[in-house]
Image (cartoon, rainbow, N blue to C red):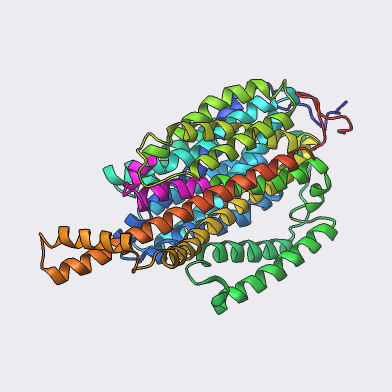
C-alpha cells in the first residue's frame, strides 16, 4: 500500500484532465519551437546577414541554456513554489519568443535564445511531475499518453508548420506563434494548478553552487561539441579536444559531488531505483533513435530527391497522425497490459520500420513510405508512455520532481547524441561508399565507356563536343555522389533498427508491476 506521500493523486478537486491540458500546452509550445526553429535557420541566416554556420548557434545557444536548467528545475520549484516557477518560466519563454522574432541582428537573437532556453528548460520536467502527481497510478498511463502528444507529436509537426510559416509569412512567425499559446498556458496554469503539501510545507536546501557550476560546464561543453564536432573534424580540432577534456572533468566531478553531497542540486541517488535507472537508459536510446529519424528522413527527401523543406515536412508529417492514433490505444492498454509487452511491441515496430527505410532508393514516390511512416508514429506511442510510467512507478511523489529533471535531460542528451552521430555517419559513410564504388567501377569497363559515350553524344546536341564530354563526366560523378549518399542514409536507418532491437532486451530488466497499480514496496 502506498501512503499519502507516496502514490496518491493530488489534484485539489480540479478535474485532472484540465490540469493535463494546462501543462501540455506549455510542453507542446517548448518542444514545437525547437523543431520549428531548425527549419527556419537558412532564412534566419539570410535575413540577419549571417553564415549558415553562425546561424546554427541559434539552436546551440538554446540547447545549452535548456540543458542547464532541466535537471535544476526541482530545486527552483522547492525554493520559489512550483506553480509560481512554472508561470514565470512560461512568461520568460513567451517574452523571449517575441524578442527572437523581432531580433534585428544575430547577436540579439542569440541573447534572446539563451533567455528562451532558460525559460523553456523547466517546462517539460515541471509539466511531467505535475501530471504524474495529479493522477492516481491506475490512470497515469492515459495521462502520459496526452503528455506524449506534446513530446512526440510536436517534433513531427514542427518542420511542417515551420516550413509553412516561413514560406508563407516570415521566419519571425516561427517565434511569434508562441505568444498566444503562452498567454493561454499562463491563464490555465494560474487557474487550475496548485502546489502539493510537500512543496508548500517543504523547504529548499541551500543552493548548490558547485553542482550548478559543474552542471553548466559539462552540459554546455557537451552540446557545443555535439553540435560543432562534425564541422570541425572532431578531435582533429584542438578546441574540441579541450572542450572534451573540460566535459569529462566537469561530468566526473559533478557525479561524485552530487552522489556524496547531502543536499545536491540534482539528487543522482534516485538512479539507484532499478526501474528509474533502466528507464533513463532506455530514454537515452529512445531519444537517440527518434531525434535521428526526425532529422535524417526529411534530409533524405531534400538532399537526394530535391524536395523543399515544406514538401519534405508534408511527406513525413503522417508520423504525427500515427502518434495521434496510437495515443488513445496506449491510454486504454496502459492500465490493462504489462508495460514490458507494450514496450516490446513499440521497439520492434520502430525497428522493423527502420529496416523498411533501409531499403530506400532514388525512385520512390511521396507515397512509397507513407505506411511505414504512419506505423513509426504509432509505434512511438507504445514506447514513450510505457517507459515513463515504468520509470516513475516505484518513486514517491516527492521524488518525482527531481527524477523528472534527470529523465528529461537524458532524453535530450540522447537526442543530441543521435543527431550528431547521424550527421557524422552521413558524411563519413558517404565518403567511404564513394571510395568503394570508384574502386569497383573502373573507367575502362565496357559498360562505363558506353554510358559515357551515350551521354556525351546526347549532350553534344546542345553544346560543343569538348564541353559535352566534360558535362557527361560531371553528370556521372554527380550520380556517383548521389548513390554514395543514398547508401549512407541506408546505413543510418539500419543502425537505428539494431538499436531498437537491442532495447527490447533491456526492457525486460524492468521490475514487474501489475498494470494500473503502484508496485509493491512503494512507501
Res 333 quadrant in image: top right
What segment carries the magenta color?
292-313
Q: Is residue 506 visible?
A: yes
Report the number of numbered marks: 0
Q: Is residue 218 left or right of residue 182?
A: right
275 shown above or below 455: above
The picture places residue 386, in percent across and down from the top left corner, at 68, 33
The picture places residue 455, in percent across and down from the top left corner, at 21, 59
> Residue 445 in magenta?
no
Front-most of residues 503 and 28:
503
Q: Is residue 78 visible?
A: no
The picture places residue 103, in percent across and down from the top left corner, at 36, 57
Front-most of residues 296 and 336:
296
Magenta stretch, overall SS: helix
- State the residue at coordinates (70%, 39%): 504
- State the residue at coordinates (43%, 33%): 370
The picture places residue 243, in percent across and down from the top left corner, at 61, 72
User: Where's the N terminus, which quadrant?
Assistant: top right
User: Where's the C terminus, which quadrant?
Assistant: top right
325 shown above or below 41: above
Amino acid at each position: 500500500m502506498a501512503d499519502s506521500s507516496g502514490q496518491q493523486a493530488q489534484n485539489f478537486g480540479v478535474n485532472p484532465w484540465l490540469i493535463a491540458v494546462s501543462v501540455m500546452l506549455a510542453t507542446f509550445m517548448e518542444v514545437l519551437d525547437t523543431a520549428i526553429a531548425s527549419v527556419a535557420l537558412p532564412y534566419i541566416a539570410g535575413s540577419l546577414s549571417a553564415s549558415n554556420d553562425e546561424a546554427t548557434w541559434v539552436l546551440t545557444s538554446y540547447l545549452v541554456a535548456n540543458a542547464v536548467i532541466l535537471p535544476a528545475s526541482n530545486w527552483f520549484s522547492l525554493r520559489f513554489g512550483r506553480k509560481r516557477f512554472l508561470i514565470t518560466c512560461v512568461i520568460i519563454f513567451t517574452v523571449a519568443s517575441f524578442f527572437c522574432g523581432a531580433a534585428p541582428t544575430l547577436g540579439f537573437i542569440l541573447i534572446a535564445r539563451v533567455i528562451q532556453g532558460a525559460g523553456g528548460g523547466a517546462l517539460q520536467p515541471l509539466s511531467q511531475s505535475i501530471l504524474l502527481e495529479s493522477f492516481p497510478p491506475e490512470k497515469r498511463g492515459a495521462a502520459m499518453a496526452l503528455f506524449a502528444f506534446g513530446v512526440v507529436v510536436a517534433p513531427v509537426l514542427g518542420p511542417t508548420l515551420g516550413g509553412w510559416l516561413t514560406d508563407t509569412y516570415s521566419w519571425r512567425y516561427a517565434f511569434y506563434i508562441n505568444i498566444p499559446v503562452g498567454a493561454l498556458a499562463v491563464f490555465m496554469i494560474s487557474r487550475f494548478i496548485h502546489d502539493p503539501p510537500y512543496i508548500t510545507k517543504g523547504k529548499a536546501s541551500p543552493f548548490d553552487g558547485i553542482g550548478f557550476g559543474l552542471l553548466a560546464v559539462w552540459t554546455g561543453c557537451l552540446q557545443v561539441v555535439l553540435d560543432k564536432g562534425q564541422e570541425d573534424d572532431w578531435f582533429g580540432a584542438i578546441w574540441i579536444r579541450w572542450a572534451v577534456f573540460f566535459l569529462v572533468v566537469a561530468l566526473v566531478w559533478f557525479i561524485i559531488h552530487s552522489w556524496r553531497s547531502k543536499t545536491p542540486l540534482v539528487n543522482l541517488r534516485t538512479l539507484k531505483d532499478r526501474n528509474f535507472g533502466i528507464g533513463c537508459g532506455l530514454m537515452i536510446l529512445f531519444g537517440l533513435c527518434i531525434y535521428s529519424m526526425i532529422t535524417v528522413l526529411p534530409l533524405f527527401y531534400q538532399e537526394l530527391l530535391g524536395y523543399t523543406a515544406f514538401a519534405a515536412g508534408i511527406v513525413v508529417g503522417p508520423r504525427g497522425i500515427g502518434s495521434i492514433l496510437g495515443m488513445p490505444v496506449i491510454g486504454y492498454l496502459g492500465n490493462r497490459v504489462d508495460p514490458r509487452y507494450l514496450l516490446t511491441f513499440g521497439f520492434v515496430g520502430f525497428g522493423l520500420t527502420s529496416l523498411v527505410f533501409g531499403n530506400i532508393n532514388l525512385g520512390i514516390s511521396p507515397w512509397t513510405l507513407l505506411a511505414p511512416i504512419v506505423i513509426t508514429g504509432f509505434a512511438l506511442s507504445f514506447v514513450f508512455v510505457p517507459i515513463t510510467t515504468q520509470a516513475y512507478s516505484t518513486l514517491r511523489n516527492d521524488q518525482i520532481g527531481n527524477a523528472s529533471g534527470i529523465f528529461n535531460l537524458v532524453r535530450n542528451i540522447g537526442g543530441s547524441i543521435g543527431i550528431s552521430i547521424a550527421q557524422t555517419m552521413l558524411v563519413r559513410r558517404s565518403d567511404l561508399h564513394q571510395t568503394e564504388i570508384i574502386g569497383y567501377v573502373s573507367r575502362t569497363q565496357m559498360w562505363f565507356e558506353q554510358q559515357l559515350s551515350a551521354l556525351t553524344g546526347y549532350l553534344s546536341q546542345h553544346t560543343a563536343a569538348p564541353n559535352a564530354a566534360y558535362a557527361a563526366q560531371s553528370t556521372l560523378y554527380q550520380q556517383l555522389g548521389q548513390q554514395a549518399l543514398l547508401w549512407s542514409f541506408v546505413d543510418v536507418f539500419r543502425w537505428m533498427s539494431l538499436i531498437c532491437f537491442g532495447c527490447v532486451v533491456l526492457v525486460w530488466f524492468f521490475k514487474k508491476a501489475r498494470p494500473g497499480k503502484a508496485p509493491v514496496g512503494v512507501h
